[in-house]
Amino acid sequence: MTLLIAALVSGIGLGSMYGLIALGFQITYSVSQTVNFAQGSVVMLGAVLGYVFIERLGMNWMIAYPLAVLCCGGFGMLVEVLLVRPFVERNSEAWLMATVAGGIFLDNAVLFTFGNEPRTLASSLTQSTWQFAGTGIYPQQVLIPIAAVGVALALHFLFRKTLQGRALLAVVQNGQAARLMGINTTAMVSGSFALSAMLAGGAGLLIAPLLSVHSDMGTLFGLKAFAVAILGGMTSASGVMLAGFIYGLVEALVTTYFGSSSTYIIVFALLILALTWKPDGLFGRPAVKKV
Amino acid sequence: MRTSRFLPQMTRRALMSGVVGLSVAISLPALAADTVKIGLVAALSGQSAKSGQAITRGLTIAIDEINANGGVLGKPIELVSRDDESNPGKGLVAARELVQREGVAALIGGLDTPVSFAIVPFANQAKVPFVGPWAAGTGITKNGAEENYIFRVSAVDEYVDEAITEYLIANHGVKKPGMILINNPWGESNEKGLTKALEKRGMETAGIEKFESNDVDVVPQLTRLKENGADSLFVVANVAPTAQVIKSLDRMGWDVPLASHWGPAGGRFTELAGKSGEKLHFIQTYLFVEGDEKGDAMFAKLQAAFPEIETTADVTPATGIANAYDSMLLLAAAIEKAGSTDGPAIRQAMYEIENIEGLIKTYADPFSPDNQDAIGPEDYVFAHFVEGQIIPVK
């Protein structure tokens, strides 16, 4: 019983992190059919900036956190303008490699400036644990699923109820028609990259107190989050969030009951099976290609 | 191909011969040896850079001392460093370049075990002595070569595993330890060593669990070990991942005896792991202990050579400095004894040198063809962090 509860607690915590980062993939993909493969590096950037603002520059967290998230948003726009748009305009798929390169660039730039020593971003929510049913949990771990679900709901609200959100949806449904109706699609695509990077940066800030802050902390997250985004179906925000929870839970349960040596073998085998069964993801709609 | 359109064939050939001539001219000073060159291949950038820096510092102090006393073979020693970025391919290329172009008499380095494994066959084939001041992989020195040119002044996984097993038994009377190991070749090397150490004593393990260096949550693995009745844990991982193990143990509220390889020593472990990090006991080959005459003298020299050093917290990992310092002294003694920079002669002399006074100990008879490791389990010190400083366990 202890085993099961420990696995569930770990799984939900991990799953919400994956889901939150995967939402970033979903947003840009919906709007522009492109993704930022540097997403994992943006997770790292959020955490590193949070650390630098608070620990080195002595800022209050109420200023430091939003500022770090905004900087990540700026980086996201930069990725779109420099690494995606020039290729999309020429009908090239090279943005794929360009964003991967952007991530590697960012990792190494941070390594060079921030240093190679892992550091700690302290949070008052990881100083003590809540004990129940033979296992412990940091308040920070409870905060992450709450934040993740909150963000998913906020996005839903943004898309349905605000003018900007509806404009984004219009771009999603038919870019050309949206442009003809006077919606600035270029700005919308840029905005989606900024939003996506802000989510990743925010996730980095939430994860940092549970992990340590260093230049390659985001790589594995970026990879798993992409798997989650594909599993969720790329087109549905709630689907991606749900896929995050499923992935996290399966990962924790497999590790608990089969041992860590088999975690990746089993989890990715299941992922392949799931995608063979539903090629558009568990909650995705089949893409209609007009010829 | 664009150049050929503008450069006639003759000019291109002339240009090529010019380039060849120039490179010969550049490599000429290497042949006209007025110094004895020693090559260093280590990670000087990336995650392991701090350890690479420690090695460089240890070597620098040793070389300064040797040169102040007249050098070797009447010539000063010159250190030629190359960064392998913890990449085996780059390490091998660097080693080859140092031997073939720079004409180094011997190589020191190979910080990461995989990098060392890449250099070992080349060093043996080129008959150039290679001294390892860091990488602990058992097979590096026990590589099966008929003429083995690989020596080491560092911990050896197999001996470390033996030492930490003995430590847990002697201090905590443990019967069923569990293993939590990083998922890479280093973790595997220790899985073998620990399994061997337990089998030797007829003990069983509560399980062997692996984790990734960026895993946030190790609770599932640890819960498995706990449920299987683990009464203690072996930990093998670098600083940050080891801290994740400690945090997960904290969350579980599981207070269990912990013995670790030297991973945590390479960084700010207690900053990452919190106060509970002090409970983790790990091995070191050397520590700066206040009041130790040799250590104090060494520390003063380090401060003089590197003004950025203020306290002993700035010279972590001390192990890297001491291993590198002693490696250089042993190598210099062997070159002097060999009377030449010829590889086979130096190798032979490595077996003949005796009573070399190093920082870790006095090496009575450091190497023999059966044992190319100068440091054994009896030289290990158990240490832990107390308020950010590494101090010996009392």
Image (tube, rainbow, N blue to C red):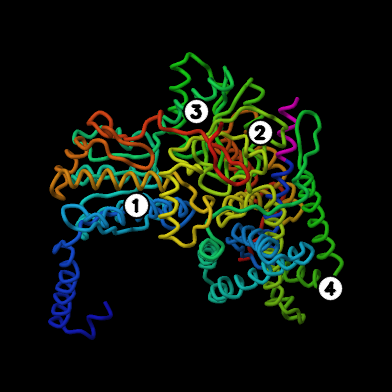
The part of the image, by quadrant, that contains residue B168 is top right
Disc 2 vs disc 4: which is toward the camera? 2
Q: Which residue is mark 2?
A: B220
- Give whichever of A243, B215 is nearer the camera: B215
- Give whichever of B208, B353 is nearer the camera: B353
Q: Is residue B193 above or below residue B15?
A: above
Number of numbered labels in the structure image? 4
Residue B188 image point, x, y percent: 45, 34
Whichever of labels 1 and 2 marks the residue nearer the N terminus, that label is 1
Q: Which residue is mark 3?
A: B164
Residue B359, disc: none
Measured in 3D between alpha carbons, the distance from the residue under mark 1 to the one under mark 2, in whole angstroms, is 35 Å
Measured in 3D between alpha carbons, the distance from the residue under mark 2 to the one under mark 4, in whole angstroms, is 45 Å
Chain ID of residue with mark 3: B
- At a point 63% along the width and 60% down the height, the residue shown is A48
Secondary structure found at label 4: helix
Measured in 3D between alpha carbons, the distance from the residue under mark 1 to the one under mark 4, in whole angstroms, is 55 Å
